[in-house]
Image (cartoon, rainbow, N blue to C red):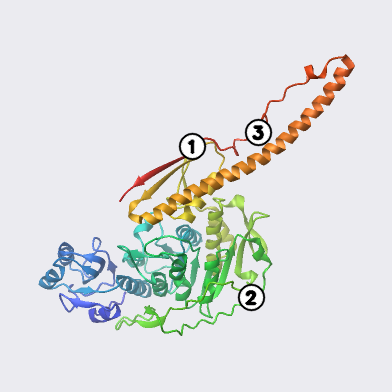
Amino acid sequence: MIDTRITIDSLARAISGNIVGASDFRSPGGFTGIFNILKDSSEGDIVIRHWIDEKGIKIASSKNVACIITEDPRGNSIDIATDLKIPLIVVKKIEEANAIALNWSIKNFVPNSKRIIISGTNGKSTTSHMIYHILKSTGANTLTNTDSKSEFNTLIDPMVPKIISEYALSNDGQLDYLVIEASEVQGWLGKLMHNHALLMTKAVNPDVGVVTNVAIDHIGLVNSIKEVFEETSGIAKGMSKGTLVLNHDDEYVFNMADFAESNVETFYFSMNSVIKDININTNTNTNTNTNNNTKVNDINNIGINNINIKNVDINNTKNISSNENSIEINKSLIYDTESKSIIYKSKPILTIEELPFNSNHFIQNTLAAISACLSLNIKIKDIVNGVKSYKSLKRRFRKINCNPIIIDDFAHNPEGIKATINAVANFPHQNLKIICAIRGSRGKEINEINAKAIVEALKDINSNYNTNYNHKNNNNHKNSKHENNNKYKNNNNYNNEHGKNNSETLPKIKNNEKLKDKKLKLKNLKIKILIKWK
């Protein structure tokens, strides 16, 4: 039975909101315990919306929802709420309300679940979904907000609290693992939600946190890589227990270990074989969050009768520098480029042939997912079986046609675009066509950067092709010359014996006769840009 003893006053205090319309829950039975979206709400639910107008208030009233929380009451919505006697809590930061809803739902519906949170500019959806798949394939009850509709399951609305409550109620509250994907940078209507990753990490209170990478994206919300780093590092700053999984090869991510509390362990994954020689653990993180300059709300200590928010410091802004801490070999996972194998504790556990995909960015996502599962003490054989049986998410490097090969990918920032193009370019092909949708709603700056990324990736492909082609051309030329000399010598001996002129009988060797390599040769490269202005 879900404990729903929460008052509208305590809720309003927790999210720094003002109550208008009515001073108590509208529904006769009070709060059901479910935070919901307006469309799916039922009597007694609490609805959270970024904005609401008169029509929305009337719909909520007709459904007898407990109350409405919003940041932007439009038109005469406050007057309508007052007339209909439906409580409306107006807040300055809607993300705090969603964090409260997420934390409350976890504590009341699935308190015994192990929780994993994943963020980063690229690869977080694939990593989240692979973690989910590996855990689920062990037979464990597992839930994630990452699926084919994951764009609508973000943490900026109550969708995740909603799916948690629905899952728990239909499964007798049994949930072993909760896998949460969190945006590294989040905003609404062009306004940055500062410290979104930090706030949501504290709401989830994870046992494992994963950061894939830091790269430029969401131009306008953030305008520099440093700002992306500051937002993404909220995962490290927000953890109070468990294991922080970091990308060893990304300098920004690697240095997030400096933000972790002393009782949070670090686990690294890498595409660099050098890490396998490091076997000394000197984790000396001493961050105790004592600076009082910048504070956000900590919603870990939410109570049922009296919701409260504890202020904590997040202004730990160390300079990005080389982290000199060595890494324990038991706390690292690498992809060895020589053996083309994933190595754990100096032993190969998967070869590249056993992976569903073998592009570098997919291998990196696989390393992140495996690292998270190792941190949860999942058996290696179960992890291996899960990876082998994994099928990619829709729009995440999904092969949607075999002849010709068509790859559908969600790449929407420079790093993602380059990684996808480079991965596809390694497929055997004669024609490479790229169709890229430019979304006007994302802004001119990011679209220009993405267009440049396409050009740069194609230049790299042509450069690599020319280098390989010339190398092969030179080798074949030498071979042809060698063969030609041998034929000349043989013919010379023959002609000397038969009294014929060598120049008349020397066979002609066609230029580039042996240079046809369909897997290497790139012909008729075409780029098609499909522009969608939204």
Disc assigned to residue 515: 3
- Badge 3 crowding class, 10 Å Cα cut-off, few under 14, some 14 to 19, many 20 or more, is some
Pinpoint residue 452: horizontal percent, then vertical percent: 46, 50
Residue located 63% across and 39% down the image: 469
Q: Identity of the amino acid at label 3?
A: Leu
Disc assigned to residue 404: 1
- Badge 1 crowding class, 10 Å Cα cut-off, few under 14, some 14 to 19, many 20 or more, is few
Disc assigned to residue 18: none
Residue located 84% across and 24% down the image: 490
Q: Quadrant of residue 345?
A: bottom right
Are the residues tagged 1 and 2 within 8 Å (C-beta)?
A: no
Please tell me whether mark 2 sits on a helix, a strand or a loop: loop
Q: Identity of the amino acid at label 2?
A: Asn
User: Quick check: 266 left or right of 100?
Assistant: right
The residue closer to the viewer here, 492 or 383, is 492
Please tell me whether mark 1 sits on a helix, a strand or a loop: loop
